[in-house]
Image: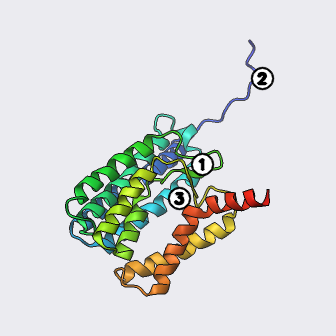
């Protein structure tokens, strides 16, 4: 076959490839941030731990759009950004929070190591589940957001038996097929969702700056936004079925 008329891709400069690879380095920085967060947790500097985990969330939010903009998949085909992202997400979303939940004293002493192991195991299984997202970009089941779950345990500071029960329930809900809102990828009510996530970030910073000693309005606002994320899809389906 004569390929003389086939378009020829322009050569890619080393600088362009290096820029693409730097996105992988940026993603991998999340693992380094997780280590710093773990060191703070070992020292029981819980607010500092959550601050570092918050920085990891910022990295996780930015690396995907940057990777698509720089065509990292095409320019660095030997490196899997998807695998790298899952590895970093596991340590920031699951492993470090699992340690904090176990070592914080918020759970029943006998139950804490068992539930901590349950968090790590269920989180690992969730990240391996190819069905973790639905066709409309909702999470399927509790999406292993143990950093958020740990944040609320520290914020609410419930009785140890109740905190233990809630952690056990979330472990079970990891495998229950209900939908949880993805704050950035679900199209429906995206403007409202992003506004609430911005408000949540402000309130969370206030809570961390005060070492979780915040007023009732801040706590109520944080809890209300969490309920919106968890229950909005169910509420939408109920309203739609009533109208039908």
Q: Quadrant of the N terminus?
A: top right
Q: Earlier in the sequence, mark 2 or mark 3?
A: 2
Camera-near label (2 vs 1) is 1
Which element is circle 2 on? loop
* Residue matched to label 1: 68
Q: Quadrant of residue 183?
A: bottom right
Q: Quadrant of residue 43?
A: bottom left
Q: Quadrant of the C terminus?
A: bottom right
Q: Is residue 9 left or right of residue 34?
A: right
Evaluate if marks 2 and 3 touch, with contact meaning CB atoms under 8 Å apart: no
Q: Quadrant of residue 46?
A: bottom left
* Residue matched to label 2: 5
Q: Position of residue 143 (x, y in %)?
A: 48, 53
Q: Position of residue 237 (x, y in %)?
A: 68, 57
* Residue matched to label 3: 62
**Residue located at (48% from left, 57% from top):** 60
Q: Position of residue 57 (x, y in %)?
A: 46, 62
* Label 2 to label 1: alpha-carbon separation: 29 Å
Q: Is residue 216 left or right of residue 199?
A: left
């Amino acid at each position: 076959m004569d390929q003389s008329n086939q378009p020829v891709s322009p050569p890619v400069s080393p600088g362009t490839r290096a820029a693409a690879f730097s996105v992988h380095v940026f993603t991998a920085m999340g693992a380094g941030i997780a280590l710093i967060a773990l060191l703070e947790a070992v020292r029981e500097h819980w607010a500092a731990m959550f601050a570092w985990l918050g920085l990891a969330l910022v990295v996780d939010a930015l690396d995907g759009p940057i990777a698509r903009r720089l065509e990292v998949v095409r320019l660095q085909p030997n490196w899997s950004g998807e695998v790298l992202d899952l590895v970093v997400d596991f340590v920031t979303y699951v492993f470090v929070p699992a340690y904090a939940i176990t070592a914080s004293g918020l759970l029943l002493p006998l139950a804490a190591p068992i539930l901590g192991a349950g968090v790590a195991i269920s989180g690992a299984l969730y990240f391996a589940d190819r069905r973790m997202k639905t066709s409309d970009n909702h999470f399927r089941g509790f999406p292993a957001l143990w950093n958020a779950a740990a944040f609320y345990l520290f914020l609410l500071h419930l009785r140890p038996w109740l905190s233990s029960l809630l952690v056990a329930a979330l472990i079970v809900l990891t495998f229950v097929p209900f939908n949880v809102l993805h704050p950035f990828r679900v199209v429906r009510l995206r403007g409202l969702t992003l506004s609430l996530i911005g408000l949540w970030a402000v309130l969370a910073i206030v809570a961390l700056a005060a070492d979780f000693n915040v007023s009732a309005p801040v706590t109520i606002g944080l809890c209300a936004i969490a309920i919106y994320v968890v229950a909005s899809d169910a509420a939408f389906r109920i309203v739609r079925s009533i109208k039908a």
